[in-house]
Image (cartoon, rainbow, N blue to C red):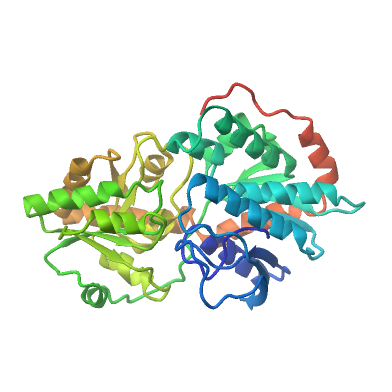
Amino acid sequence: MVGANYSPEPTGNAPYTSALSRALVARGVDVNVITTFPHYPEWRIRDDYEGWSQREAIDGVDVLRLRHYVPRRPTPVRRLLAELSFGVRSASVRWPDADVVLLVSPSLFSAAVASVRLAATRRRSVPGVVLWTQDLYSLGVTETGAATGRLAQAVRQVESWVVRRADGVVAIHDRFARHLRDVLGADAEAVRTVRNWTHLRPTSGLDTAGARRELGWPDGETVVLHAGNQGAKQGLRNVVEAARVADARGAAVRFVLLGDGSQRRELEAAAEGIRSIQFVDPLPDDRFPAALAAADVLLVNELAGLAEMSVPSKLTSYFDAGRPVLAATSEGSTTAHELDLSGAGVRVDAEDPEALLAGVLELAGDPERRRELGTAGLRYRRHVLSEEAAVDRFQDWLTHHAGSSVRVRRSHARRPATSGATT
């Protein structure tokens, strides 16, 4: 596995790359991981990692860590440089012999460098290559406005090339799979959907009252918890402004932003003097589930216009907590679609603080509705988003492509990406 994020990073892709590796090892598979020094979501390499490389064993997985460029303020250009630096570092070390290589995107440009390396070192017997797409860059740069015109087209061309070079592609949602086929030119038979699952270990008897006391959440307040990355695409300034409105109205509501990310310092500055908002540092896995279960409402917040680019990884943990979900997201977005499928939450318009607060107050006044939504999410997580089912599909797909790259990749290379597609 080659990917930029791995345990002990608590959010983003790391919980899934780590859980998949751990589960495959438990099934008798030898797994080697090439990754970076832990740095996300703080965008700062942790103090206990030094030097240019470091090897460690985590849950039976051999993990090679490589130092790469980590920007303190991850602008789009700096993130590109970070991905390229990891790609160059990963391409410069000796890879262990393998039957199949799993490339994880993000980061796309590291995967592109890895694909070049695999093409340049082709031997008589080569590993199969599977690409795991957790985000779609070509949609992301368009929907967030990070790139337009020729630059956006260049990103799409790179992503299309990486997708078509792979023998197999894993999409985390059927809507991702459609984009991979229809826009990026992937062969329909090369794409398989494997849903993300909850990475939290099973828990029982959570002390939610104790968690509320520890976190300073009074019983008389409705706690609305957003857990995870605090970056650009989350658009969390909307939450700050909703808290400001709650203050003005004297509403007994507390918005909690749990986690870290590139925008946290700016958000804290914008929230100065607002009573109805609280920032909480990332919690360890043994405390995180209790915090989710102790909240009254679990929040997904996205920028307006984000429709297809990503499926918030936090949703799997939210469903597992059995709490109602409130999503401030655009109508027709993948997040909204997921809430419709699960029956676990309600949607309000993105970047509308008044609508966000109104959604909170509506749920606060209807305990039975909150219970129904939470129960539906838990049921959906158990029947659709189980780890065992996901690992079964992953193992089958990886085994299918082990050592199969020469015939398939040459076939894919002849297929042009769909031209003229809109995103």
Answer yes or no: is residue 219 visible. Answer: yes
Residue 148 drawn above or below residue 335: above
Residue 13 drawn above or below residue 235: below
> In percent of the image, x 71 and y 71: which residue is there?
28
Quick check: 397 left or right of 380? right
Position of the N terminus, as image quadrant, is bottom right
| Residue 394, horizontal then vertical, whole percent | 64, 55
Residue 176 drawn above or below residue 39: above
> In percent of the image, x 31 and y 46: which residue is there?
327
| Residue 414, horizontal then vertical, whole percent | 79, 30
Front residue of this view, candidates 312 and 23 = 312
Front residue of this view, candidates 329 and 243 = 243
> In percent of the image, x 50 and y 45: which residue is there?
76
Quick check: 23 left or right of 377? right
| Residue 22, horizontal then vertical, whole percent | 61, 69
Quick check: 24 left or right of 317? right
Q: Quadrant of residue 99?
A: bottom right
